[in-house]
Image (cartoon, helix red, strand yellow):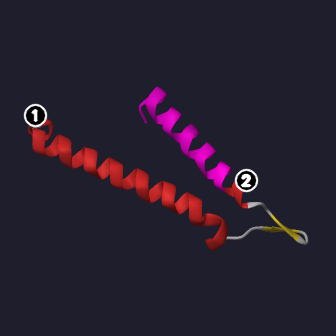
Amino acid sequence: MALGSPFWVLFNAAALVAAVYHSTSWFNVTPQAMPIQRGEEFVPGNIIIGAHYAVWAVVSLVILVWGV
C-alpha cells in the first residue's frame, strides 16, 4: 500500500516521463550513432527510426495484453 501514496505515484510518473524522453531522443539520434550500410548505400534514417518505434510499440502491446 505504501507504493500507492501520492509521493510514489508522482515519482513513478516522473520516471516514466524521463524514460519516454530518453527513448525518443535516442531513437531520433540512432541513425547518426549507428549508420547501417547495405551494399554501397546507407539505410535511410527514417527507416531506422521507424523500426525502433515499431518494436517499441509491439513490446508495449505485448506487455499490456499479456502482462509480462
Q: Is residue 59 above or below residue 46?
A: above
Residue segment shown in magenta: 49-68
Q: Is residue 64 magenta?
A: yes
On residue 47, the disc is 2
Q: CA distance from mark 2 to mark 1?
A: 44 Å
* Mark 2 in CB contact with mark 1 (< 8 angstroms): no
In-front residue for pair 43/68: 43
Q: Residues within 10 Å of mark 1 (few under 14, many from 20)?
A: few
Q: Is residue 40 above or below residue 67?
A: below
Quadrant for the C terminus, please: top left
Q: Is residue 56 above or below residue 29?
A: above
Q: Is residue 14 magenta?
A: no
- Image coords of residue 17 (percent x, y): 34, 49
The residue lying at 19 percent from left, 44 percent from top is 10
Find disc 1 in the rendering and name its residue: 1
Three-letter code for the amino acid on which mark 1 is drawn? Met
- Image coords of residue 24 (percent x, y): 50, 54
Three-letter code for the amino acid on which mark 2 is drawn? Ile
Task: Give the mark, 2 or 1, whose residue is nearer the N terminus.
Answer: 1
